[in-house]
Image (cartoon, coloured by chain):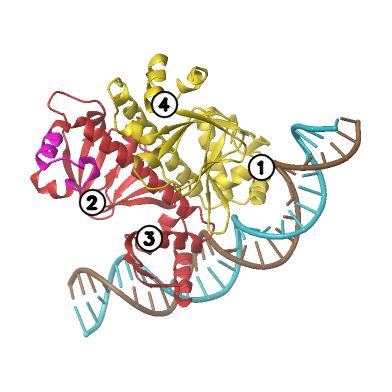
Chain colours: A red, B yellow, C cyan, D brown
Amino acid sequence: MEKYLGILSKCRLFENMENENITAMLDCLGAEVHSCGKNQNIFIEGEPASHMGIMLSGKANIIRMDFYGNRSIVTVIEPPQLFGESFGCAETKSVPVNVVAESDCEIMLIDIRKILHPCCNACEFHSRMIFNLMKSIAEKNLLLNQKIEIISGRTTREKLMTYLMIQAKEHGSSFTIPYDRQGLADFLEADRSGLSAEISKLRKENVIECKRNFFRLLEK
Amino acid sequence: MEKYLGILSKCRLFENMENENITAMLDCLGAEVHSCGKNQNIFIEGEPASHMGIMLSGKANIIRMDFYGNRSIVTVIEPPQLFGESFGCAETKSVPVNVVAESDCEIMLIDIRKILHPCCNACEFHSRMIFNLMKSIAEKNLLLNQKIEIISGRTTREKLMTYLMIQAKEHGSSFTIPYDRQGLADFLEADRSGLSAEISKLRKENVIECKRNFFRLLEK
DNA sequence: AAAAGTATGTTGAATTTTCAACAAATGGAG
DNA sequence: CTCCATTTGTTGAAAATTCAACATACTTTT
C-alpha cells in the first residue's frame, strides 16, 4: 500500500489526514488494489453499487450506451479522482453507468458501507472521512452541472466553445484535453466528423489553434 | 415554524429525526422562512453560495441562461426538496445557476456553514444531519446523471422518449409532468414547436396518449 | 525507412432541428 | 357566455447534424 500514498494523499477523500492515518484507515476499510487492462470494464451498468473506486494510475471513462448503441462519455477519470461514490452513498440498488479502462490502470476499491456505517473502535478519522466524502460528492455535482451546461448547447460549435472556455478559465488559454476526437465528440454528445469540421472552421476564423488534443484560444 | 413541520418531516435532511428534534435543529441553524412571488429570483447566478434552501410550498425552476439567452431548465424543485446544497458544500465561491420561482412560494433558507461546522453544544443530531445531507447530495447526483442521460439523446424524439420512460418506470404508465410545453422543451434542451410536432407524431403512431401535461405510454 | 494501423479531416446527401409566423385550443375574468 | 390572454399545434424554409465514404496525417512496428 505504501507505494500508493503519494497519490492517495492528494485524494479529496483523505484531505487533511496524515499518511500514517491514511494507512490505518485503508486497513480498517478493507481497501483492495486491482489492476485492469485497457478496455476492461471496471463497473458494469446494472451491477450492485457496493464499492467506490479511487483511480491510482491510468485513465478510465464513465460511459453510457444509449438505446441505439451510441457511446456517450459522461466524464474521464484520472488519478487521484474518486468514482462511483455517489451511487453507493445514495444507496441505489445498481450502478447506472459503465466505467471502462481507457488504458491499463490501477484502482483502489472500497466497500461504501464500511465508510457509511462507522465500524469498530480505532477510527477516530471516520467522521472526517465522511465529511471529505460529502465534499467530494458535492464537487462531482458541480462537474455534472458543468457537463450539463456544456451539452445543453444546441450546436456543435456552441458545445465545443463552452467546453474550451471552461478549460481556458481553469488552465489558461493553452491546454491539452484528455480526449481524442472521437472521445471529445462522445463527451460533447456530437458527431465526430461534424466536430472535426467545426474545429477546422474555428481554426480558419482564427478563434483557436489546435493540434490534436492541444488547444489554444486566441484573443478576440 | 410549527406549521411547516409536516413538510419538513418529509425532507431528506431530517430523515429519521423526531419533530421536536427538527424544531431544535432549525433553531440552532438559524433557519429562516421567506416568501417570494412568481418569477422572482431566489438565487442569482454569481452570488455567494452561502445558503441552501428547502422548498416548503410552490414550485421553482433551476435555470441557466446560455450565451444567446436561451433558457435551459436544469430541473424543477418542489416541496420538500432541497436546493443549492451542493454549491454550499463544495465550498464554491458562487452559485452557477439561477433559481426562479415559477409560482408564489415559501422557502426555508439555512446557512450552510452552520451545518458543515458543528456549532455549540446541544446538537447531538448534527452528525445525523450531515449524513442525511450527504445522502441528499448523492441522490441529486443521480438525478443529474439522469438528466445527462436524457439530454444526451441526439433527436427530440429520443430525449422525449427517454424522459417519458424514466417517468413511467417511476410512476407507472400514466403520469402528470411538472412542465408545460415550453418548460419541457427547455428541460429537454429542444425546440418547443419541434417538441409539439414530435408529440403529435407519437400520438398518431399510438405510442403515447397526451393531454397537456398528462401522459400515458401505450404498450408496444 | 516502409508498412500497417489508427486518428483526423473533408465532403455531399439525407435527416432533423431551429426559427418565425400563424392557427387552434384552453382557461380564466367579467 | 363571451372575450381575452396564454398555451399548444402546425407548417415551410433555412440552418445544422448525422451518416457514410474516403482522403490525409500521424504513430508504431517491423
Residue type marked 2: Pro
The image quadrant where one finds the C terminus of chain B is top right
Q: Which residue is mark 4?
A: B12
Mark in the foreground, 4 or 2: 4
* Residue C8 or residue B118, whichever sits in front: B118
Helix or strand or loop: what does disc 2 sit on? loop
Q: Which residue is mark 1?
A: B205
The lab-note entry on whether marks 1 and 2 share a chain reads no
Q: Which residue is mark 3?
A: A169
Q: Position of residue B96 (x, y in %)?
A: 45, 48
Mark in the foreground, 1 or 2: 2
Task: Please name the predominant secondary structure of the magenta segment in the image.
Answer: helix
Residue type marked 4: Arg
Left or right: residue A106 compared with residue B75: left
Q: Position of residue B43 (x, y in %)?
A: 50, 42
Are the residues flagged by discs 1 and 4 in contact, CB closer than 8 Å?
A: no
* Residue A10 or residue C24, whichever sits in front: A10
* Residue A196 or residue A148, whichever sits in front: A148
Q: Is residue A9 located in the magenta-colored stretch of the structure?
A: yes
Q: Decide: few, some or many residues near mark 1? Use Cα within 10 Å; few <14, some 14-19, many ≥20.
A: few
Helix or strand or loop: what does disc 3 sit on? helix
Residue type marked 1: Glu
